[in-house]
Image (cartoon, rainbow, N blue to C red):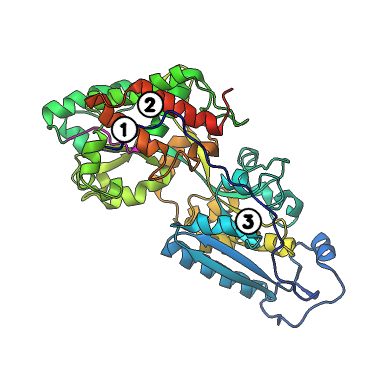
Amino acid sequence: MKRKLAATLLAATMVVAMFAGCGTTASKETATPDASTDATSVTETATTEEASSQDPNAYEECTLTFDWWGGDSRHEATIAAIEAFEKKYPGIKIEYNYGAWSDWETAKASEYLSGTNADIQQTNFDWIRKYDGDANTYLDLRTVSDTLDLSQYSDTVLALPVDSKGGLAGIPVSLTGRTFFWNKATYEKAGLSVPTTLKELMEAGPIFKEKLGDEYYPLVLTEYDRAIFMAFYLQAQTGEPIIDQNNNFTMTEEQLKLGLEFITSLEENHVIPTIEYYDGEGAEAIDKSVRWIEGKYAGCHNWDSAHKSLVSALPNGDDLVVGNALMDTGAHGSGTYVKVSQMFSISAKCEHPHEAALFLNYILNDEEGAGIMSTERGIPESKAAFAVCEAAGKIDPMVAAAHKSVMDSNPMYWNPLFDDSSLKGDTALYNNLFEGLSYGVRDGSYSIEDAAADLYAAYTAIAPAK
């Protein structure tokens, strides 16, 4: 067990320095997309701005840089889309860079500081606050809305990635939220239906223990899962997001204590395993857990997009079903939140914003480009892209059901400060605190009062109390 946490925690902040320009200087010749048009056959009579105002598909020859992270299938789809775009728009060259998530943000943070960030980037929602605090890092995408079709996105979606000056700092590719996934076979083995309320979930713990044994649990929650589930529980008591849109922390230390008591009660009632028991297996993730594979963990609280990895780990994938938000957690609230899963942003210093917007519109809204990109970054928020993917049978029914479960729960606002690096991470507060609490309540080394004080200090260090 880790040592008792310090009562006062310091939140690290990142200072963003001068942001230099990006983009490659190119000729001032312009062209229009035509597969039969050679890149050297161009019209020299219009500037990019003039062409854009006359024809959004006209463009200036240039080279743009683009980077993203992900897995192999995402890389393959994105590269294929780039190649198709370059064929459709000869004269625009996309130089790209990609990699896995591990250490990706560290590298990008250095690029933001040095001003070497790419013209077009896959970005995270919280990067707006981290790297665009002065609203001078990312281009306001509304300035290129003659090229990038924003009408494909709802006003609710476009209201999320807004910078400090009200500009649109990124275009959300997809939204994601938390929902429950249940192994109905294990619940049936215990003589139960999958839970639809918190009351049913709490009652399942003792029944699992009695009928199936100590190794069976209705639900499994990692440390980070516990932080999220506790936040939902508290929001349901107050009707306010735990950190509001003004970046204020809305809870008191006493309310945090109630939330921590709730999480502890899940362990005490055999609803979830202790952290010691979960960590003892040594699994890297829930879908890698032998106990999950064997159905001994009969539920998890995960992202709506996580279905594929969870179901593929089970001997019979049909055993996994999507649950609903447990709306009886409190009188006022929602059992979940929705956050921007990923965005695409254009650098404010990009020398060819029209051409960058042309590329984004192609991969996000164009029938050909969106079809190639498919659902590699989640269920598309673009109405046009969704229609293309749905017609092609690319929308996984269970992922769609999980996403619908989230959206139907009247989700609350999610503030990216909830995932601040001082809170989320292998050595950050959530992991240390919920591990310490799981051990400490049982052996007396770390109390709920201690944890509430530590958590309150950590939250108010990054988000002042309301």
Residue 30 at x, y = what percent?
Answer: 79, 73
Q: What amino acid type is highlighted by mark number 1? A: Gly
Residue 151 at x, y = what percent?
Answer: 68, 47
Q: Is residue 224 magenta?
A: yes
Q: What is the magenta range? A: 216-225
Q: What amino acid type is highlighted by mark number 2? A: Ala
Name of the residue lying farthest toward the right: 45
Q: Nearer the viewer, residue 263 or 4?
A: 4
Query: Residue at label 2?
Result: 451
* 341 horizontally vs 5: left or right: right
Give how far apart the Cα atoms at labels 2 and 3 are.
35 Å
Check whether the beta carbons of the residues at disc 1 and disc 2 lie within 8 A of each other: yes
Q: Which mark is residue 113?
A: 3
Q: Is residue 61 magenta?
A: no
Mark 1, other Cα within 10 Å: few <14 / some 14–19 / many ≥20: many
Compared to 356, does 60 lie above or below? below
Task: Mark 3 or mark 1: name the one nearer the start of the chain.
Answer: 3
Task: Mark 2 or mark 3: name the one nearer the start of the chain.
Answer: 3
SS at circle 2: helix
Residue at image coords 27%, 34%: 219
Q: Nearer the viewer, residue 41 or 138?
A: 138
Q: Which part of the image, by quadrant, shows the C terminus?
A: top right
Q: Which part of the image, by quadrant, shows the N terminus?
A: top left
Mark 3, other Cα within 10 Å: few <14 / some 14–19 / many ≥20: some
Q: What amino acid type is highlighted by mark number 3? A: Leu
Q: Which mark is residue 436?
A: 1
Compared to 422, does 348 lie above or below? below
